[in-house]
Amino acid sequence: MGADEFEEIYPLLAAFNNALMSKEDWRRMLFTYPWESPSRHGFGYYADGKPVGFIGAIFSTRHVRGRAERFCNLSTWIVKKEFRGTSILLTRRIVDALAGHAVVGFTPAPTTCAVFSRLGFLPLETEQLLLFPLARPTDVWRAFQGSFATSAASITTSSTDKLTAGLAAMPDGLDAAIYRDLSSCSRV
């Protein structure tokens, strides 16, 4: 299904009742993403010429071990209640149509996992890793000094020199090396 079929599919997407997603948000997410321009943006399930189901297909090409690999992230699966019993037909056709692609689903619902498991898909990951932002060494130093600057301009050369000297005094000096490497990075 191409980008020109968005208007036809939108009533199904609106049935998600997601107040955070406007019509244009749905269009951008599923039909006009900037990194690829595929001819297909999803798969429709029709009954009597009217759409009763849809599953989004977000395509990308990544270089893996020196080779261009094609990926398809299946997203936004919705089927009208009265057709859900036969929607496995839609998923089988999708799997067939995506031969040559690594098919992924990053955030599937439990029901979706069960369906794709029956089709032979396996989970790639079963655990989650949360990465928290790390404070800059100057922030840590100021925390121990009891002073938090309100801007980067308030960090003086002498306090930076003290921090560098303090880090260099650590047993392996690794913290000082990391600080030196990162001190030239621009701040965002």
Image: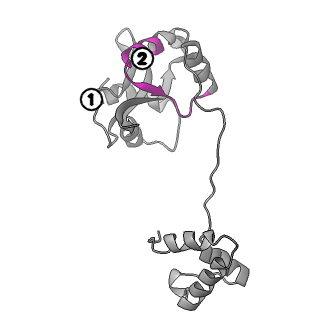
Is 62 part of what is drawn in magenta? no
Mark 2 residue element: helix
Residue 19 location (% of width, % of height):
52, 42
Mark 1 residue element: helix
Q: Is residue 113 above or below residue 172?
A: above
Residue plotted at (27% across, 29% down): 4
Left or right: where 131 falls relative to 22: right
Residue type at tag 2: Ile
Instruction: State the quadrant of the N terminus.
Output: top left
User: Which numbered disc, 2 or 1, marks the residue that appears first in the sequence?
Assistant: 1
Question: Residue farthest to the front?
Answer: 172
Residue 167 location (% of width, % of height):
64, 77
Question: Residue farthest to the bottom?
Answer: 158
Residue 71: quadrant of the picture:
top left
Residue type at tag 1: Asp
Residue under label 1: 4
Can residue 70 be seen by looking at this rendering? yes
Observer-nearest residue: 84 or 107?
107
Residue plotted at (64% across, 49% down): 130
The magenta span reads 91-109
Residue 129 location (% of width, % of height):
64, 45
Residue under label 2: 94
- Of tags 2 and 1, the one toward the viewer is 2
Separation of residues labelled 2 and 1 (CA atoms): 19 Å
Left or right: where 44 falls relative to 38: right
Q: Residues within 10 Å of mark 1 (few under 14, many from 20)?
A: few
Observer-nearest residue: 7 or 60?
60
Residue 163: quadrant of the picture:
bottom right
